[in-house]
């Protein structure tokens, strides 16, 4: 396994839902320290590496540390565990899935229980199960045994998925590509530029609590006070059966995504055109996408202080917000290349021109 794949594996394997990003941040700190002039952190937990440039302007590159998951809310008398979602889940992807319950004393594998079809009426089989009616089974006989293992309300539950290179080795499967992909890209950009001179200050890293309302983006951008910002996040893959391409394309292997708009941000038009022109000059294929629902950290970056021209750049991802997701390695490599070229293209005058 090469270093880039090891980076992606280590970042997706680590567990950290919104509010529980401690171990992810610790790992990011290990990766950012050798490639940064200094580290920048805010009080909520966002972390960035900084590379000083020759100019006075600053660009912020931000992935996010958190993944979607669940929080334990109750243990019933038989030891079954009730939970509430952290981040956006569609109930149909949860039943019978393996999960990791993370306690202060250790980790336990469980499964979200489901009723065998033999016990369901024809009408019941057609209905979906509400998340509030689901439970996690970690294989204990009662509440007392669960509590003796350290299980308690407030513990974190994350999907259990093994990092896998697929039939075509360019296709990789993991949990938490949303958005450890962005964390890995933030590290790779700093690494690529470590020994080069640049004409803007580069602040590159990841925020906390994106999945519950872009909260860390607000505090991080306030701390950094950038002149431009790019939210690095995954986008929708439209190359699977049943998906429409009317809002733009997202084909795995066809290049990084440039998001024109989502529910939280209209990609800054001047900045977007600069990126499109640059991508064409450098021979980097990009895919344009509009996402009418959802949002990225650009939704908060762009409203901080006096306003920050912001874009979202990412890669198409299959099966987002489920236990598993699939990404294409060439998309990741080209997204790194694109962001590196964006940083290299900037100086004080170019940044001022982009704004209006």
Image (spheres, rainbow, N blue to C red):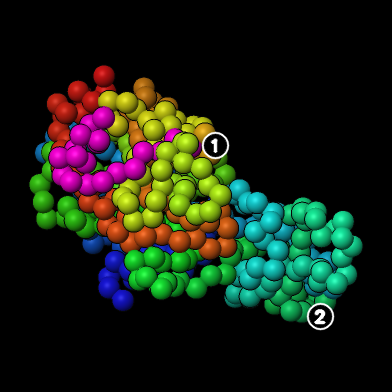
Neighbours of disc 1 within 10 Å: few (<14), some (14-19), many (20+): few
| Residue with the mark numbered 2 | 141
Judging from the image, what secondary structure is the residue with disc 2 in?
loop
Would you name the residue on which mark 1 appears?
Answer: 293
N-terminal label among 1 and 2: 2
Q: Kindly state the secondary structure of the residue where label 1 is placed.
A: loop
Residue drawn at x 42%, y 28% is: 266
The residue stretch that appears in magenta: 273-291
Residue 127 in view (yes/no): yes
Residue lying furthest front: 241
**Residue displayed at 27% across by 70% down:** 3
Horizontal side, residue 128 vs residue 287: left or right: right
Q: Position of residue 188 (x, y in %)?
A: 26, 57
Residue 47 seen in the current view: no
- The outermost residue toward the top is 356
**x, y percent for residue 336:** 26, 52
Q: Residues within 10 Å of mark 2 (few under 14, many from 20)?
A: few
| Quadrant location, the C terminus | top left
Q: What percent of the width, then of the height, locates residue 339?
A: 25, 46
Q: Give left or right: position of 154 versus 321.
A: right
In the image, taking residue 66 as reference, residue 151 lies left or right, namely right
* Above/below status of 25 relative to 164: above
Image quadrant holding the N terminus, namely bottom left
**Magenta span has 290?**
yes
Q: Residue 118 in magenta?
A: no
């Amino acid at each position: 396994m090469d270093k880039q794949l090891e980076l992606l594996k280590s970042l997706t394997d680590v567990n950290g839902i919104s509010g529980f990003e401690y171990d992810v941040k610790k790992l990011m700190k290990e990766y950012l320290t050798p490639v940064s002039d200094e580290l920048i952190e805010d009080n909520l937990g966002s972390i960035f590496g900084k590379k000083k440039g020759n100019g006075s302007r600053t660009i912020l590159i931000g992935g996010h540390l958190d993944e979607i998951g669940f929080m334990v809310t109750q243990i019933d008398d038989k030891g079954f565990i009730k939970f509430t979602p952290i981040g956006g889940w569609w109930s149909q992807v949860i039943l019978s899935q393996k999960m990791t319950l993370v306690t202060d004393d250790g980790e336990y594998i469980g499964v979200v229980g489901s009723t065998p079809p033999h016990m369901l009426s024809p009408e019941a089989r057609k209905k979906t199960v509400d998340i509030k009616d689901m439970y996690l089974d970690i294989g204990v006989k009662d509440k007392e045994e669960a509590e003796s293992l350290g299980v308690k309300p407030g513990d974190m539950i994350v999907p259990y998925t093994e990092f896998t290179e697929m039939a075509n080795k360019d296709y990789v499967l993991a949990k938490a590509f949303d958005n450890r992909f962005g964390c890995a890209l933030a590290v790779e950009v700093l690494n690529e530029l470590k020994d080069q001179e640049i004409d803007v200050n580069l602040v590159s890293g990841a925020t906390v609590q994106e999945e519950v309302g872009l909260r860390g983006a607000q505090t991080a951008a306030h701390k950094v006070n950038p002149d431009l910002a790019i939210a690095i996040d995954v986008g929708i893959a439209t190359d699977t059966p049943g998906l429409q391409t009317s809002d733009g394309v997202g084909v795995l292997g066809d290049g990084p995504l440039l998001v024109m708009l989502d529910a939280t941000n209209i990609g800054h038009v001047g900045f977007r055109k600069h990126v499109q022109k640059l991508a064409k000059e450098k021979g980097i294929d990009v895919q344009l996408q509009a996402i009418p629902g959802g949002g990225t950290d650009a939704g908060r970056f762009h409203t901080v202080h006096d306003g920050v021209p912001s874009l979202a750049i990412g890669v198409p991802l299959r099966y987002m917000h489920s236990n598993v997701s699939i990404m294409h390695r060439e998309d990741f490599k080209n997204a790194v290349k694109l962001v590196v070229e964006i940083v290299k293209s900037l100086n004080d005058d170019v940044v001022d021109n982009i704004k209006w």
